[in-house]
């Protein structure tokens, strides 16, 4: 994690990119266990095919966790004030996810300086999978 100084940041500044290794079936099984989300669509190929999917696919919250890691690699977790995403497309087994963030606003709220970040995940084909926002606080 880097030490970030609010005054040195500007709208348009980008966070250091985070890229995952290709998502594997093992990653999905481990995430099932860690999250408690045992929906078979994520681990049972026959179930996924029965639901009309060509294969199992990643939990949306796994990609959200990758974005959370992007932010908390940049600032300490205690500076996070808001965090949310919109799921845009399915993340498939084999997708290599790139997480990106950009400063889109600097403002003051509740007596502290804050930054709003626009966040995205994309796969290796530049297909957007998640879009999100985070607000980071810089206590005085």
Image (cartoon, helix red, strand yellow):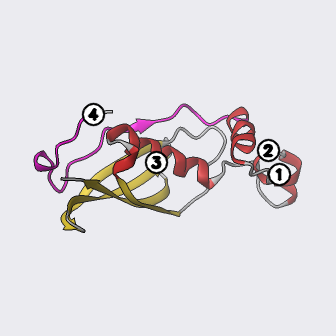
User: Whole-Å distance between the Cαs marked 1 and 4?
Assistant: 39 Å
Q: Which residue is mark 1?
A: 40
Q: Which residue is mark 2?
A: 43
Residue 67's disc number: 3
Q: Is residue 2 above or below residue 14?
A: above
Q: Earlier in the sequence, mark 4 or mark 3?
A: 4
Name the secondary structure under disc 4. loop
Name the secondary structure under disc 1. helix
The answer to whether the residue labelled 1 contacts the one labelled 2, judged by CB atoms less than 8 Å apart, is yes
Q: Is residue 6 magenta?
A: yes
Q: Earlier in the sequence, mark 2 or mark 4?
A: 4
Q: Which residue is mark 4?
A: 2
Q: Is residue 32 above or below residue 131?
A: above
Q: Earlier in the sequence, mark 1 or mark 4?
A: 4
The image shows residue 125 at horizontal and vertical percentages of 48, 45
The answer to whether the residue labelled 2 contacts the one labelled 3, judged by CB atoms less than 8 Å apart, is no
The magenta stretch is 2-25
């Amino acid at each position: 994690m880097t030490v970030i100084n609010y005054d040195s940041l500007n709208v348009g500044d980008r966070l250091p990119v985070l890229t995952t290794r290709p998502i594997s079936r093992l990653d999905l099984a481990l995430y099932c266990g860690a999250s408690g989300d045992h929906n078979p669509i994520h681990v049972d190929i026959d179930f996924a095919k029965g639901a009309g999917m060509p294969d199992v696919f990643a939990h949306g919250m796994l990609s959200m966790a990758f974005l959370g890691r992007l932010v908390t690699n940049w600032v300490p977790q205690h500076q996070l004030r808001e965090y949310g995403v919109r799921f845009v497309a399915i993340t498939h087994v084999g997708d290599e996810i790139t997480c990106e963030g950009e400063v889109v606003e600097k403002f003051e709220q509740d007596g502290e300086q804050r930054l709003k970040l626009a966040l995205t995940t994309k796969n290796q084909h530049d297909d957007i999978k998640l879009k999100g926002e985070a607000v980071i606080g810089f206590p005085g």
